[in-house]
Amino acid sequence: MSERGALHIKRLDSTQPDQVARWEAFVATCPKATFFHRAGWQTVIRDVFRHPTYFLLAEQDGDIVGVLPLAHVNSRLFGNALTGLPFAVYGGVATESEEAATALEAEAQRLAVELGTDHLELRHTERRHTDWPVQELYVTFRKAILPKEEDNMLAIPRKQRAMVRKGIKNGLTSQVDNNADRFFALYADNVHRHGTPAFSKRYFQTLLKTFGKDCEVLTVSSAEGRPLSSVLSFYFRDEVLPYYAGDDEAARDLAANDFKYWELMRMACARGLKVFDYGRSKEGTGPYAFKRNWGFEPTPLHYEYRLYKRESIPQNNPANAKYKLLIATWRRMPLGLANWLGPHIVRNLG
């Protein structure tokens, strides 16, 4: 058997369709790749958030053997970081070759130093470097979708199943939307009530445009037609990933959230999908408890760091006590002002 040629690290140019097609073909088949390794994120991060991107690929004998998408977020408030990948639950290196992984990470570290960053962050689902500082704040929830609709209903724990049936009895309906209008109205109101800044409507519109049929909005309405709850989901291979969500204050009493996720699961089952990825949550929070109530078990996420100009891992999340006053202030801010100001802040959080 002949030896393979030398490994070369290159950068993706998303303006070149042939390069994008090769990248996408690799991501579609690499077991370690996720939806957040897709080439479209380079367009989204560059065009919406205006952050420089460095989508690295390892090439050997003319074949792509590994990828590492990175973006540089430099903020006075939240620090200077090279991250794989900001705004993503999963990231880091996607490859089955340890040689490629080592080369990609070496180039990422070289870039991080060259750019003068405070740190490099790689959002791996598994530990790769036991000697790197690690953030284990988040867990993810994933569960198999059973082949039959009724079996998925019965797999939901009894109390949670009762909430789904309550939503059905309330005459709730679901509809796939062809734009982000209803979703954004519910999402923006929801995050404002929780005291956190909202992404811009343009961000969600760009996601829908960039990822096409692999990005979808599902909205639940009352029997009278009033929008109550909405979710924007990603589709990757045989998985569905509900990623952004929002709801009206009336949603809780009508069990609209419970009905929404059941409808998403039911529709995914009808499409023949195999995995429902509920996404990440912080332990001890309401979303964490909600997902456990659905019978999902948490799996820790390992966000690994190389620190260059700081001594500890950054804590840019709502659980940080120093943001308590800011959250309280944000809740009192008029919604229109919050929607205008929010995108300028959240673009730097990543």
Image (tube, rainbow, N blue to C red):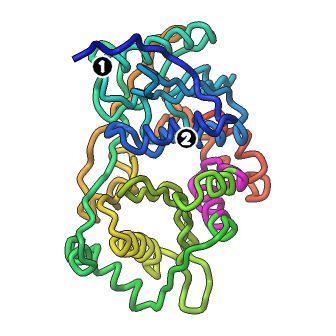
Q: Identify the image quadrant of residue 170.
A: bottom left
Magenta segment includes 196: yes
Q: CA distance from mark 2 to mark 1?
A: 24 Å
Which residues, given as a range, are shown in magenta?
Answer: 184-202
**Is 293 drawn above or below residue 341 in the view shown?**
below
The reply to whether callout 2 and callout 1 are in contact (CB within 8 Å) is no
**Image spot of residue 145 (x, y percent):** 27, 65
Of the numbered discs 2 and 1, the one sitting upstream in the chain is: 2
The residue under label 1 is 98
Given residues 227 and 12, the one toward you in this image is: 12
**Quadrant, the C terminus:** top right
**Is 284 drawn above or below residue 54 in the view shown?**
below
Q: Identify the image quadrant of residue 289.
A: bottom left
**Image spot of residue 315 (x, y percent):** 49, 29
SS of the residue at dot 1? helix
**Image spot of residue 280 (x, y percent):** 39, 47
The residue under label 2 is 21
Given residues 190 and 107, the one toward you in this image is: 107
Q: Amino acid at mark 2?
A: Ala
**Is 328 drawn above or below residue 135 in the view shown?**
below
Dominant secondary structure (helix, strand or loop) of the stretch shown in magenta: helix
Magenta segment includes 22: no
Q: Amino acid at mark 1?
A: Glu
Given residues 237 and 176, the one toward you in this image is: 237
- The answer to whether any part of residue 346 appears in the image is no
Q: Which residue does the image show at 67% across and 25% down from the upper left? A: 75
Single out the mark in the foreground, 2 or 1. Answer: 2
